Image (spheres, grey):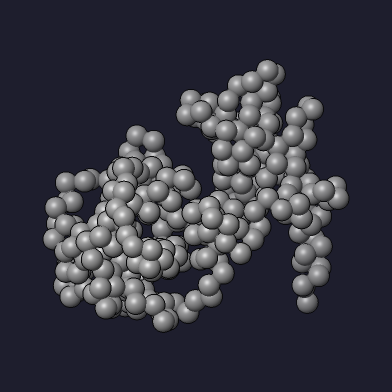
């Protein structure tokens, strides 16, 4: 069921639509050029590392109109970074982007029917930038949308195109449009886990990449004497960038934050070393360790 919220509906559509994905390796190497398609979709994705651009430029599709992602890491913040662009001749535009040093991979989306007009790709570029900014996994080198307008029918076609882009990007190694929490799990009572400490409460849940602590979760002001250096550094970084806001007697998370594990999340919440498998509990009081045991017992042999 769609809600009218563009981000929610984009993600919901991508998870509602089952897909058969065909991944072709022209050079026989999964780290080289990759071609990805979805059954019954007119689009096509091409991805390649910067070191394999020769193979990419030899492809006929690269001369078509489309949208593209330049993906890498910001040297100052060490965060994932991306540039989202559009061009009527993607290959020609990519050759103009060689001066951007940060990117190490490019992902291109074109239409097999070659029916993407300048208006279409400008609209797609704007929507891609808009959704990537809302999700917030990547720093964006260009965060200004074009504001391109389309007739209603064309706009709906491009929204469908957008959902397919959302599905293919993680397959090609880029999670720029992957939400921290999947829609079907999002903050439902059965999935929520809490970590109460010193009268404060943090809330979160497991994700495919680790563990997310939700916005408005609380964290202790003080560090434990035994706090490891990485916890100190992580909290200092979150304080500096505004992720942790200091309030009366506590910190509060200003946005959802994903960690590599439940223990890493709990450590930042309490300011010291802690076993996340026993710290996080569901509404029935069962901790993650107990939930894992139940799950494996249920589906074990």
Foreground of the two, 262 or 142: 142
The residue drawn where x is 64% and y is 20% is 247
> Can residue 258 be seen in this snapshot?
yes
Residue 200 shown left or right of residue 91 in the figure = right
Q: Is residue 195 left or right of residue 145?
A: right
Q: Nearer the viewer, residue 250 or 278?
A: 250
Where residue 28 appears, as percent x and y from the top left, is 31, 78
Q: Position of residue 132 (x, y in %)?
A: 42, 50
Residue 44: image location, x then y, percent: 32, 73
Residue 271, relative to residue 21: is it above or below? Answer: above
Q: Is residue 120 rendered to the left or right of residue 13?
A: left
Image check: 32 left or right of 90?
right
Query: Looking at the image, which is closer to me, 22 or 264?
Result: 22
Report the number of numbered marks: 0
Please give the name of the residue rendered at 76% of the width and 55% of the height, measured from the top-left corner: 190
Q: Dividing the image into 4 quarters, which one contains the C terminus?
A: bottom right
Please give the name of the residue rendered at 38% of the width and 42% of the height, measured from the top-left corner. Answer: 139
Q: Quadrant of residue 1?
A: bottom right
Is 120 situated above or below 279? below
């Amino acid at each position: 069921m769609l809600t009218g919220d563009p981000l929610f509906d984009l993600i919901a559509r991508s998870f509602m639509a089952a897909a058969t994905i065909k991944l072709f390796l022209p050079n026989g190497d999964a780290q080289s050029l990759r071609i990805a398609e979805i059954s019954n979709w007119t689009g096509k994705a091409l991805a390649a590392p910067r070191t394999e651009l020769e193979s990419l430029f030899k492809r006929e599709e690269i001369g078509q109109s489309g949208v593209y992602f330049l993906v890498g890491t910001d040297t100052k913040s060490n965060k994932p970074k991306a540039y989202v662009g559009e061009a009527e001749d993607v290959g020609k535009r990519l050759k103009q982007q060689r001066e951007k040093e940060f990117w190490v991979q490019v992902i291109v989306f074109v239409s097999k029917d070659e029916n993407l007009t300048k208006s279409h790709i400008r609209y797609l570029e704007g929507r891609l930038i808009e959704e990537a900014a809302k999700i917030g996994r990547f720093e964006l080198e260009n965060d200004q949308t074009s504001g391109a307008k389309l007739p209603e029918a064309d706009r709906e076609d491009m929204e469908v195109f957008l959902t397919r882009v959302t599905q293919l990007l993680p397959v090609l190694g880029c999670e720029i449009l992957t939400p921290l929490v999947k829609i079907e799990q999002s903050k439902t009572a059965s999935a929520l886990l809490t970590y109460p400490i010193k009268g404060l409460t943090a809330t979160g849940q497991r994700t495919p990449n680790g563990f997310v602590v939700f916005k408005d979760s609380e964290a202790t002001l003080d560090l434990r004497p035994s706090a490891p250096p990485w916890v100190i550094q992580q909290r200092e970084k979150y304080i500096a960038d505004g992720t942790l806001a200091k309030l009366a007697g506590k910190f509060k998370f200003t946005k959802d934050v994903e960690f590599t594990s439940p223990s890493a999340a709990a450590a930042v919440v309490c300011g010291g070393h802690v076993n996340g498998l026993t710290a996080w509990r569901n509404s029935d009081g069962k901790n993650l360790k107990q939930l894992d045991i139940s799950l494996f017992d249920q589906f074990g042999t």
